[in-house]
Image (tube, rainbow, N blue to C red):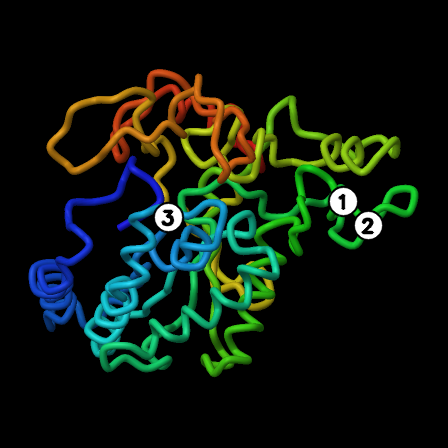
Amino acid sequence: RDCAALASNGELGPTEIDKYKTQYIDPIAAILADPKYASLRIVTTVEIDSLPNLVTNVAGRPTETANCNVMKENGNYIKGVGYALNKLGSIANVYNYVDAGHHGWLGWDSNFGPSAELFKQAATAEGSTVSNVHGFIVNTANYSALKEENFKISDSVNGTSVRTSKWVDWNQYADELSYAQAMRDKLVSLGFDSKLGMLIDTSRNGWGGTARPTGPGALTSVDTYVNGGRYDRRIHLGNWCNQSGAGLGERPQAAPAAGIDAYVWMKPPGESDGASKEIPNNEGKGFDRMCDPTYTGNARNGNSMSGSLPDAPISGQWFSAQFQELMKNAHPAL
């Protein structure tokens, strides 16, 4: 499922597209189509962490992986997502939302447009049409701040753009809300429904507690300005596993901002992203060094420390220490 990571990459191999269709999607569709559920509005989020990898982690990119090259060449992510959207979208009370990464993954010009075009390709594969896509979801199981209020991407310090800061690193977006709204506009321009809606996972992007800045950073340089004022306290935007210092974000709510269908808690708070060390298991879950607090990084996180919490269990298992920290650092506070 995730050709660039190991903690939750799933059981199926790169060529098992037929098994994906018949043994995974078809049984789900059969359940959702049961007449006894017809009065329910059922929301699906489709294949988190799959499609964005085909833009950022393939040949020609410094973050390429052999597995992502294979998945791009065989087209099975495209086929799988298209099949799922077609099968699930044919059920009248099912609303599909496709994964659109997050601003710290796809927010650069070189990623943003190509990703939107790839989403359109997947939405029209295997007999699907864009009408099967009700919207997109961003920041799933991630930590990017909803709104950075102490600096804007258009700010400059002594004539130098904040986009040149080490944290922003030429990204076009500072936070998830601006990214989600911009991605929505781009997708509509490519032919998706004008009523397209976005979901933002706010389960772990609150970044509250005593470390939360109360105003902008010092105007000494773009780095002091951004680092002193940013809510997101990760070491690097590319860090994604059991992040130290994170807090619960905005509570789930409908229609919180223009173009946004809802803030949702898609990743259950307290559910581990991956194990801090190798733990044998029968769930197909490997050990990803990004979950190791002693890891000094790779090209995908700027060769920075991972920032992950110690003593974490495998992905999907309950991680009490993380949950307690999320509650302590919640913003809005509990």
Can the viewer see residue 198? yes
Q: Looking at the image, is mark 2 or mark 3 earlier in the sequence?
A: 2
Number of residues whose C-alpha sits closer than 10 Å to that of mark 3, classed few (under 14), some (14–19) or many (20 or more): some
Q: Secondary structure at mark 3?
A: loop
Residue nearest the observer in this picture, 111 or 203:
111
Q: Which residue is mark 2?
A: 155
**Real-space Cα distance between discs 3 and 1?**
27 Å
Number of residues whose C-alpha sits closer than 10 Å to that of mark 2, classed few (under 14), some (14–19) or many (20 or more): some
Residue 275: % across, % down: 30, 25
Give the residue at x 25% y 64%: 74
Number of residues whose C-alpha sits closer than 10 Å to that of mark 1, classed few (under 14), some (14–19) or many (20 or more): many
**Real-space Cα distance between discs 2 and 3?**
32 Å
Q: Is residue 72 above or below residue 328?
A: below
Q: Are marks 2 and 3 in contact (CB under 8 Å)?
A: no
Q: Is residue 142 above or below residue 213?
A: below
Q: Which residue is mark 1?
A: 151
Residue nearest the observer in this picture, 269 or 115:
115
User: Which of the 4 quarters of the picture holds residue 268?
Assistant: top left
Q: Are marks 2 and 1 in contact (CB under 8 Å)?
A: yes
Q: Amino acid at mark 1?
A: Phe
Q: Are marks 3 and 1 in contact (CB under 8 Å)?
A: no
Q: Is residue 111 above or below residue 225?
A: below
**Real-space Cα distance between discs 2 and 1?**
7 Å
Instruction: Specify the farthest residue to the right.
Output: 158
Left/right of residue 159 with respect to residue 187 in the rendered view: right
Mark 3 vs mark 1: give the one in front: 1
Residue nearest the observer in this picture, 238 or 149:
238
Mark 2 vs mark 1: give the one in front: 2
Q: Which residue is mark 3?
A: 266
